[in-house]
Image (cartoon, rainbow, N blue to C red):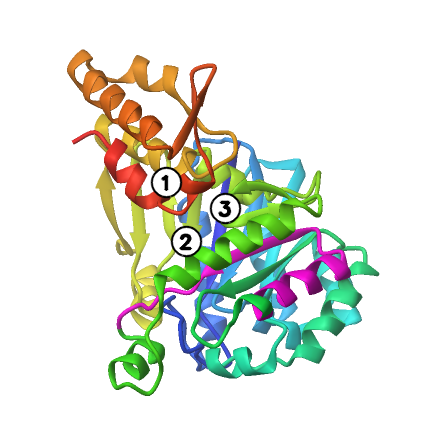
Amino acid sequence: MAGIYIHIPFCSQACSYCDFHFSTSLKNKSNIISAINMELKNEQLYLEGESICTIYFGGGTPSLIDNILIESILRTIHNNFNVSPTLECTIEANPEDISSNTINDWFTLGFNRISLGVQSFREQDLNYMNRIHTQEQSLRSIELLKKSKINNFNIDLIYGFPSLSDDAWASNLQQVIELGVPHISCYCLTIEPNTALFHYIKNKQEMPLDPKRGRDHFLIAREILTNNNYSHYEISNFSKKGYESAHNNNYWNKTKYLGVGPSAHSFNGKSRRWNIKNNTIYYTKILKNEIIYEEEILTSKDIINEYILTSIRTSAGLDWSHIKQQVSESELNIFNLEVHKLHQSGFIELKNEMIYLNEKGMLFSDRISQNLFLI
C-alpha cells in the first residue's frame, strides 16, 4: 500500500505561526494545478505500482481551490495509479470555507474525510494566530459535517501559548467532546524563524513561549481525551474507535508516499525527495521537464533511525526484534544500553519485545529518539 500527498500552496492570509510554503496570491493557481497534474503523470512509476490507499490534499488551504481543479487532480491520480477501492481521501479545509454545498461537492468528487483547521474555539486565540475564521464558523462547520455524508473528520487544535491558560485549554477540549468530534490533532505551538510570531517575540511585542506550559497542556489533553473514550494512538493524535487516520498511520509505519506540488516531500523506502519551495520556479521547471526536487539516498542506518523516530511516537510502539535483525552486534549493544537507561529512568515501558513511551516519555519523545539513534 502507498499514499499520495498533494500540496496546495495557497492561503487567504498568513497565520502568525506558520512556516509552511504558501502564497496569498491566487493568480497562478491554474498553472500550479496544471503542473501538479504533470508531476503526477511524470512520477506514476515512483510507487512501483503499489495500491494507493490514501490521498491527502494539504497545504496551504486546499479548500480555496475551485472544485474543477481539484477534480482534475483526482482524475489524473485515478488514470495513472492503482487506486484501492477502500481509499481514504482527505482534504484540509478552514471553517470559513465550509457549507452544505461544499461538503456535498467534495463527497461527489470522492472525498470521505475532512481535516478542519479550527485551532481554537476562543476569539482571542484566533486573533493571536491571525486566523480568518470565527468561533461561530468553527461550530457551524462541525455541525454541518456531523450531518453530512462526510462525517469522518478531524479538527486541529493548538496549545502551549502564553494567553492560553490551563482552564481555557481544558475548555477547548471539552468543546470538542461535547461536539462529538471523532478525531483530534493537538499540536504544541512552536516558533519557527521567519514567521510573524518569531519577529513579534524577538521585538518583545509578544511573550516568549514557556515549555512548561506546553508540557502541562499536553498532559491535560491526554487526561481529558483518554477519559472520554479517545484513543491516544500517536503523540499528537486522538481518535474515537475506528476513526484513526490511515494517512497518519501510513506515515508513521514508513509506507511509501509520493508528494506532489511545491515543497512536497516523497519517500519510497530507499530515498527521500523534497520539491522546490517556489511556485513560479516549480511550474517553470515542470514545463521544461527539468528536475524539481532534491534527493537523499538513505543508508541502512538512516532507515533504522527513521523507523525509531516514527514508531516510538505511536501506541503500537517500537519493535525491538526488528532492530535486532537490522543492526550489527556492536550497534545492538549500544542500543540495548540506551534502552536499559531509558527504562531505568522511567521514560519507556517494555513488553513482549516492544518498546513504548509512557506518559513521562511522551513529553521528551524527540530527545528519546535521538538517544536511540544509531550513530
Q: Which residue is mark 1?
A: 267
Which quarter of the image is occupied by the C terminus? Answer: top left
Nearest to N terminus: mark 1 or mark 3: 3
Q: Position of residue 105 (x, y in %)?
A: 74, 64
Mark 1 or 2, closer to the camera? 1
Nearest to N terminus: mark 3 or mark 2: 3
Q: Dot 3: few (<14), some (14–19), or many (≥20) neighbours within 10 Å?
A: many
Which residue: 40% across, 70% down?
18
Q: Could you say which disc has been placed on residue 188 in the image?
A: none
Amino acid tagged 2? Glu
Vertical side of 103 occupied by 5: above or below: above
Inter-mark Cα distance, 3 to 2: 12 Å
In depth, the one of 164 and 72 nearer the eye is 164
Q: Is residue 327 left or right of residue 350?
A: left
Q: Position of residue 69 (x, y in %)?
A: 58, 66
For this orientation, the residue located farthest to the right is 147
Is residue 301 at least partly visible in the picture?
A: yes
Vertical side of 269 occupied by 129: above or below: below
Inter-mark Cα distance, 1 to 2: 15 Å
Which residue: 55% across, 55% down?
220
Tag 1 secondary structure: strand
In depth, the one of 91 and 187 nearer the eye is 187
Q: Dot 1: few (<14), some (14–19), or many (≥20) neighbours within 10 Å?
A: many
Which residue: 64% across, 50% down?
225
Instruction: Magenta stretch: give its range.
Output: 168-193
Q: Which residue is mark 2?
A: 39
Q: Is residue 265 left or right of residue 13?
A: left
Q: Could you say which disc has been placed on residue 4 in the image?
A: 3
- Which image quadrant for residue 254? top left
Q: Position of residue 193 (x, y in %)?
A: 26, 70
Inter-mark Cα distance, 1 to 3: 10 Å
Is residue 108 at least partly visible in the picture?
A: no
